[in-house]
Amino acid sequence: TKLGGLAVTEPGGGSDFSGQKTKAEFVCGQWVLNGRKCFITNYHADVNVITTVTGQDEKGRNQLTAFIVEKGTPGFNVGRHENKLGLRGSNTGDLNINDVKVGEENVLGKVGAGAKIGMACISEVGRAGMAAICVGILRGCVEEGVKFANERILYGKPIAKLQAIQFEIANIRTDYEASKLLLYSATGKKDAKIPAATDFSLAKYFSSEAAVRSSKRAMDLMGGYGVINEYPVGRFLRDALASIPSGGTSHIQQLIIAGSTLSDFKA
């Protein structure tokens, strides 16, 4: 079993997918790759798929090609390790690509098909994973909120009896159930081989924002205990915040959702 990664994002930005600077040139029967990737999940992986610019189309737009590059390939080195606010169990860092030579057999798919391959991986795998993480955070918020509300005694009774606390529990549960249903709907479509890129954007956008607000609600519910690291809700909030830029920011998801909606619901 080998650990894999996808290296798309560059220092100039991740949302400008076609504006990548990492290049690959075909020289003397082999491809030579040069560039730098950043914010790469599993950057230390055994195998990484690297997207590079290999030419331009008739309109002058970059054509991308995806390459399979194994750890230990000369010139292919890990860079800085990012000290993240949350999702610290997931290693994130830079990849330095200096005159990395690979054969034609290392091309994933076809030359010029890198954009399609990279975006499919991000939109229907990466965002699915991030939405699933957020659903897990939300489940944790429900469980920790209910546990604390039943155990914390105030005015001679559990705070679960207080209407204000019940409102917070209801909001957290609603965010959890809605996020879970959006994710399950998207994955059901993918399993049925129905295009689901917009559905995953919906799930990722809603669940990541919901995880942030529900983590905050759980912290509010717990009062001073909510900011004590012996309790998990502080980590829930940090992980939720770190999930928002992963796989595309909330603004990117909104653009995708809006574009699809304006097309699909056109009169």
Image (cartoon, rainbow, N blue to C red):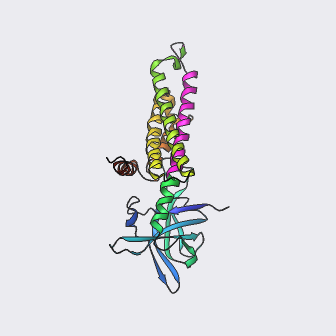
The secondary structure that most of the magenta stretch takes on is helix
Q: Position of residue 97 (x, y in %)?
A: 49, 72
Q: How many marks?
A: 0
Residue extending farthest to the top is 156
Query: In this rendering, would 49 be left or right of 251?
Result: right
Up-down relation of residue 84 to residue 71 (above or below): above
Based on the picture, tell me whether residue 142 belongs to the magenta stretch. yes
Residue drawn at the location 54% of the way across and 54% of the way down:
193
Which of the pair 164/181 is nearer the observer?
A: 181
Based on the picture, tell me whether residue 169 belongs to the magenta stretch. no
Q: Is residue 194 visible?
A: yes
Residue drawn at the location 39% of the way across and 48% of the way down:
257
Q: Position of residue 267 (x, y in %)?
A: 31, 46
Q: Is residue 232 visible?
A: no
Residue extending farthest to the right is 1
Q: Which residues are magenta?
A: 127-156
Q: Quadrant of the N terminus?
A: bottom right
Q: Position of residue 179 (x, y in %)?
A: 49, 39
Q: Position of residue 140 (x, y in %)?
A: 56, 36
Q: Quadrant of residue 44?
A: bottom right
Residue extending farthest to the bottom is 28
Up-down relation of residue 132 to residue 62 (above or below): above
Which of the pair 230/219 is nearer the observer?
A: 219
